[in-house]
């Protein structure tokens, strides 16, 4: 109606908009807002029974479009520090978590050596996720460029800070217990950029 009405230059634009708004309001049932409110209330009740507390009920109707949920918030409902529970991708099943203690040496080297942590008099400071990773594998940052665990020393020779355009960071490291001058390039970041 609107498109045809706009083609006719003799029609009143006011009457045309009025007719279009009458059509729209007659198509939408008057019970719709009440039905939406009931649906949100029923959803709140069901979520409450499951132990899920919703602080913004008006967002419940949008939850039907969600296919994946990722939670990365600490401090509000939980403790101040992160705890690493496991590492994925160590076995054939990509969803299987491996304890940080039982992951491969190279994975531990990446977690211990590819970070932007700084050593201070109070201990290591920096990104909470990097601190949690270092704590979970029980490595210690003894200086800004040296990470140790037992008799193994991982020396950071060069850091390439995280770049948002590259979506990754990297470090060049060496292992003090190796007799050769072998260097390792440790990289972490978005999987799609690392694969490329």
Image (tube, rainbow, N blue to C red):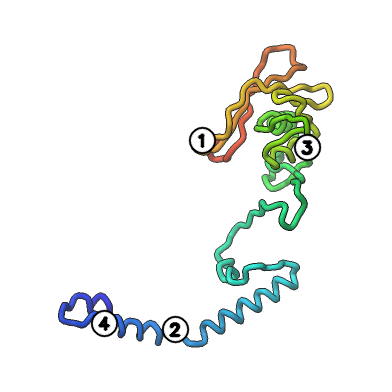
Q: What is the C-alpha distance between the residues marked 1 and 2?
A: 49 Å
Q: Residue at x 66, y 67 (%)?
A: 55
Q: Position of residue 28 (x, y in %)?
A: 44, 83
User: Mark 4 against mark 3, which lies toward the viewer?
Assistant: 4
Specify whether 134 is left or right of 188: right
Locate residue 24 relative to residue 126 in the image: left or right.
Answer: left
- The mark nearer the N terminus, 4 or 3, is 4
Callout in the foreground (2, 4): 4
The numbered mark, 2 or 3, whose residue comes first in the sequence reads 2
Q: Residue at x 74, y 58 (%)?
A: 77
Nearer the N terminus, badge 4 or badge 1? 4
Secondary element under disc 2, as helix, strand or loop, is loop
| Residue matched to label 3 | 135
Residue 8 screen position, x and y as percent = 17, 78
Residue 156 location in percent, x, y?
Answer: 67, 23
Could you tell me how far apart the alpha carbons at marks 2 and 3 are, in whole angstroms? 58 Å
Inter-mark Cα distance, 3 to 1: 27 Å
Badge 3 element: helix
Outermost residue on the left side: it is 10
Question: According to the image, label 2 marks what residue?
Answer: 28
The residue tagged 4 is: 14
* Cα gap from disc 4 to disc 1, whole angstroms: 54 Å
Q: Is residue 65 left or right of 103 when viewed as pictured?
A: left
User: Alpha-carbon distance for marks 2 and 4?
Assistant: 22 Å
Residue ID for mark 1: 166
Which part of the image, by quadrant, shows the N terminus?
Answer: bottom left
Q: CA distance from mark 4 to mark 3?
A: 69 Å
Label 4 neighbour load within 10 Å: few <14, some 14-19, many 20+? few
Q: Residue at x 75, y 17 (%)?
A: 176
Q: Position of residue 80 (x, y in %)?
A: 75, 49
Q: Quadrant of residue 40?
A: bottom right
């Amino acid at each position: 109606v609107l498109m045809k009405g706009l083609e006719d230059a003799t029609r009143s634009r006011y009457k045309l908009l009025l007719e279009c708004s009458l059509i729209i309001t007659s198509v939408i049932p008057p019970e719709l807002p009440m039905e939406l409110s009931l649906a949100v209330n029923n959803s709140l009740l069901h979520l409450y029974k499951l132990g899920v507390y919703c602080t913004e009920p008006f967002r419940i109707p949008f939850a039907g479009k969600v296919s994946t949920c990722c939670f990365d918030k600490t401090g509000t409902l939980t403790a101040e520090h992160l705890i690493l529970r496991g590492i994925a991708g160590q076995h054939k099943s990509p969803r299987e978590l491996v304890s940080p203690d039982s992951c491969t040496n190279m994975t531990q080297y990446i977690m211990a050596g590819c970070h932007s942590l700084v050593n201070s008099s109070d201990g290591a400071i920096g990104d909470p996720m990097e601190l949690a990773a270092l704590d979970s594998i029980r490595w210690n940052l003894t200086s800004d460029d040296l990470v140790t665990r037992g008799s193994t020393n991982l020396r950071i020779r060069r850091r390439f800070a995280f770049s948002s355009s590259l979506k990754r960071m990297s470090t060049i490291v060496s292992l003090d217990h190796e007799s050769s001058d072998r260097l390792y390039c440790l990289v972490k970041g978005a999987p799609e950029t690392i694969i490329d």
